Amino acid sequence: MKKFSFIQKIRNQIRVEGNLDLTIAKNVKLANCKIRVKGKNNKLTIEEGTVIRYTQLEILGDNSSIYIGKNCIIGHESYLSAKEGRTLIVKDNCSLSRNVKVMTSDGHPIYQNNKIINHAVDITLENNVWVADNVTILKGSNIGANSVLGINSTVTKSVPSNSIAVGNPAKVVKQNISWEH
């Protein structure tokens, strides 16, 4: 396991129980974050040019991972969680505003006839996705490249590329759009 740098340790609350495959590019800005990892064979990758502040990253269970691509911005009070052996991917040039929640699981198992009925599912945000304030992205959602998720939306299914989705649950209201940082 690569270690967090001394500066990363003093600027963030980091707790690792188990083992973690860690890759953090040298020019990543990581400040006032809470990082919690518990389990075996977990992975955290943060690529170059990414800025993450006042955010909670949680990787729980075995074989779970979070990947954050190049030149991403993740805003204050956001929460990214990968559990139950699932992967959360945020590709390059994504902007997540304040209080964004992205979760591969429901948090607690629900049983029917002694079998879990709400298994965790991977999440992917493709390149150049803009997620506005207070958006929640739930398990199994895949957000297409160059898309926008409107303020206060709850995303429960996939959104195609070049689209705007808004509401609770989020619905596509515009297609063939583009946006700039």
Image: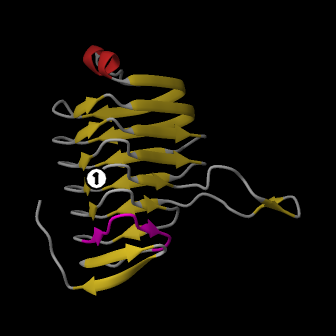
Please state the horizontal and vertical placement of residue 63, each as a whole percent of the image: 54, 43
Q: Residue furthest left?
A: 180
> Which part of the image, by quadrant, shows the N terminus?
top left
At 28% from the left and 45% from the top, the residue drawn is 75
> Is residue 56 placed above or below 174 in the rendered structure?
above
Indicate the position of residue 26 as horizontal and vertical percent values. Answer: 18, 30
At numbered mark 1, what does the secondary structure look like: helix, strand or loop? Answer: loop
Which residue ends up furthest to the right in the rendered image? 113
Looking at the rendered structure, the kind of residue marked 1 is: Ser
Query: What's the coloring here?
Result: secondary structure
Q: Is residue 161 visible?
A: no
How many numbered badges does the structure rendering display?
1
User: Which quadrant of the structure image shows residue 33?
Assistant: top left
Q: Which residue is mark 1?
A: 97
* Residue 149 lies within the magenta run: yes
Q: Quadrant of the C terminus?
A: bottom left
* Depth order, front residue of 68/164: 164
**Residue 106 in the image: above or below residue 79:** below
Image point 24% across, 56% down: which residue?
94
Residue 9 shown left or right of residue 116 in the figure: left
Viewed as shown, does residue 130 lie left or right of 125?
Answer: left
* Of 100 and 119, the residue lying toward us: 100
Report the span colored magenta.
Answer: 147-157
81 in magenta: no
> Which SS does the magenta portion mostly show?
loop
Dot 1, how many residues are within 10 Å of its Cα: few (below 14), some (14-19), or many (20+)? some
Of the pair 62 and 154, the residue shown nearer to us: 154
Q: Can residue 106 be spotted in the picture?
A: yes
Asked whether, in this view, residue 49 is left or right of residue 96, the answer is left
The residue under the point 49% across, 39% down is 58
Residue 170, horizontal then vertical, whole percent: 43, 75
